[in-house]
Image: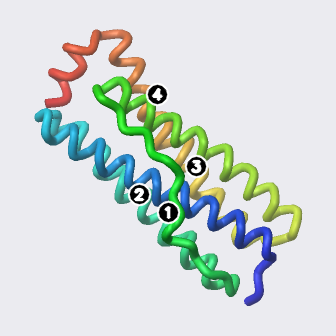
Amino acid sequence: MQGHPKTIELLNELLAEELSAADQYFIHAEMYKDQGLQQLFERIDHEREDELEHARLLIARILFLSGTPNVAKRVPIMVGQDVPAMLKNDLEVEYRVGELLKLVIAHCESVKDFVTRRELMVLLEETENDHAHWLEQQLKLIELTGLENYQQSRM
């Protein structure tokens, strides 16, 4: 099926964001593991897998629309140097991806590509209701309990 060229372009932008998010989660997960923060390692490694699944969905959709997935493009990642910075940087990525998803969803609706829109709505729900919400909770827990108590609870 021939997709709208702008849709394919925007899906490739999303793909770059998702692959970059996976890269950022990968380094942060390994940093948590190195610090002995096993619970954070497990959750962030799971988030990395989610981002790769999002990338897989985008690749499949781009191919279906007769486009060429650009798996080489990335956006700069932000590696945090401590737990709060890693969580904040990851949250910034989720906010950025959420905004881009909304833009692409609106575009898909404008060109009447309701199937792509529906698939992206699933990604948006995961981005906002799962990924971003969990990161917001962690930052709030650090604020409420203090960094040392938070980190101890995540070992």
Of the residues shown, which amino acid type is indicated by label 3?
Glu
Give whichever of discs 2 and 4 has the lower sequence position: 2
Circle 3 — which element?
helix
Give whichever of discs 4 and 1 has the lower sequence position: 1
From the image, tell me which residue sits under label 1: 54
From the image, tell me which residue sits under label 4: 136
Q: Mark 3 and mark 2 in contact (Cβ < 8 Å)?
A: no
Residue occupying the point 75% across, 51% down: 103
* Residue 50 numbered tag: 2
Residue occupying the point 43% across, 39% down: 78
The residues tagged by marks 2 and 4 sit, at their Cα atoms, a distance apart of 18 Å
43 and 11: which is toward the camera: 11
Relative vertical location of residue 45 with respect to residue 110 in this rendering, above or below: above
Q: Mark 2 and mark 1 in contact (Cβ < 8 Å)?
A: yes
- Say which of marks 2 and 3 sits in front: 2
Circle 1 — which element?
helix
Of the residues shown, which amino acid type is indicated by label 2?
Asp
